[in-house]
Amino acid sequence: MLANQIEIQVKEKNGSLVDFIINLQRYAVAGQMFSDITHELNNIVGAMLGFAQIAKMTNKENDIKKCFEVIISCSEKAKQINNSMLSYLQANSKDEREADINTIIYQSISLANKGFYRKGIKVSFLPGSIPIIKLRIGLFQHAFLNFLLDVKKNISNGKELKITTEHNEKEKQIEINLRNSTFLADCRTRAERLESFQDIFNSFENPDGLNKDINVRIASWIVNKEIGGEVLNSGEEKVTGYKIKIPV
Amino acid sequence: MLANQIEIQVKEKNGSLVDFIINLQRYAVAGQMFSDITHELNNIVGAMLGFAQIAKMTNKENDIKKCFEVIISCSEKAKQINNSMLSYLQANSKDEREADINTIIYQSISLANKGFYRKGIKVSFLPGSIPIIKLRIGLFQHAFLNFLLDVKKNISNGKELKITTEHNEKEKQIEINLRNSTFLADCRTRAERLESFQDIFNSFENPDGLNKDINVRIASWIVNKEIGGEVLNSGEEKVTGYKIKIPV
């Protein structure tokens, strides 16, 4: 067993390596967003510092009042970012609860938004009228953030990402669309290569080591196996759009 | 291959799964600290908000001046935390550079300190006179933060964690000690179970799924294989102290 080659056998039922990697990857997603969020917080704190310094130098009562207003509104903005992050990190990822997917998407966008902003990408979200469903909220947000971060990585600077939700009553599902502005065709190709966790393991055989689609692979696996949904992608070489279907 | 049992073969030389897990775990460490750091930032921002609101209500010039001073010093504290985090996340973990280990430890403590503070644990660091060495800084900090987080998890509330560094000229190594106040005996037991990355994989066979020592196992592996050092632990059932030896 201490030879060059290590053989690992993971029982799919037991799934401990799978659980480990998914749990690790959830924190890693937070770590990856941390960089962008920290930059955003630095900007906010920088503004507060600037206005406090201006207020210190002036004697005009009105100017001082204005500076306080800015500092107070900055504080509230910073607290909102912090609280979104805490609620993501503290959610028990397997707990199933009644949830409004629109709210989860809104919160996820607010977490990832700083990264898009830095690339000059505009994110627009048009929430549809969708029913409240029972959902593993933590896992869903984990998966959704992975899709967002993947689109962010693959979308060109200055483009637009349009996110919509809709309720398909006939097929009894909620459909979530992530599309960039140049991706006009409907998502029709089932993301076949993302079906099984085994694909994720297989990709480690890649001589480059890390497989670049690893986040999306894990996210699709969560949607398929843990949420019972389905993921479609653009079918193009460079993935820049997703349609996620969640059963109602 | 789509049977119940998945067989994964990872070539130790190629090591892509190892690289993947180490890289993922590095971001996960950041994610784990994020929760504590976000609480700390929330406190700082809360203080800024409070003083801005007080200043808004008063007309006494002196009180207003004092509030500005608090807001400015809070801003600087928040920026320092943010910048420590950014430098950890943005470091290329494999780049080898000349480094002062005392500085890296100091920065790591400042990142993890919020978590200790919340458990009422005092962390004291007495930096010794040690030489500057060529080191993979990102990997070393990754490993060191893992040891810190492990001690934090296993140390009782209200205890003290003492960290020291010293230069052992005879054995040509830098020794870093992490000890809690009840851990009096010297670290003499080599952490044998932490020698190989294979142990980490084997631990997934554990019916509980996640192995609780996983952070320490990965950290020891990094010190052994990537830094060329050695890790000793207390040899007690519950690990609450470490001695890390880095060759000079």
Image: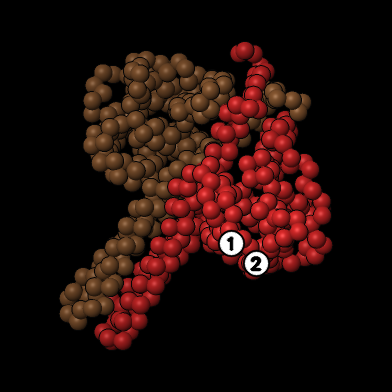
Chain colours: A red, B brown
Residue A153 image point, x, y percent: 66, 54
> Mark 2 is on which residue type?
Gly
For badge 1, the amino acid type reads Asn
Mark 1 element type: helix
Q: Quadrant of the C terminus of chain B?
A: top left
Horizontally, residue B155 falls left or right of residue A231, namely left
Q: Position of residue B4 (x, y in %)?
A: 70, 25
Count of numbered circles on the image: 2
Mark 1 vs 2: CB contact within 8 A: yes
Q: Is residue B88 visible?
A: no
Q: Residue at x 26, y 36 (%)?
A: B157
Which label belongs to residue B102?
A: none
Identify the element where label 2 is drawn: loop
Work out how far the residue at label 1 is from the one at label 2, CA to CA, in angstroms. 8 Å
Q: Quadrant of the N terminus of chain B?
A: top right
Q: Chain of mark 1?
A: A
Say the numbered circle drawn on residue A128: 2
Q: Which residue is mark 1?
A: A102
Residue B121 x/y as whole percent? 26, 38
Residue B182: tell me if it is visible.
yes
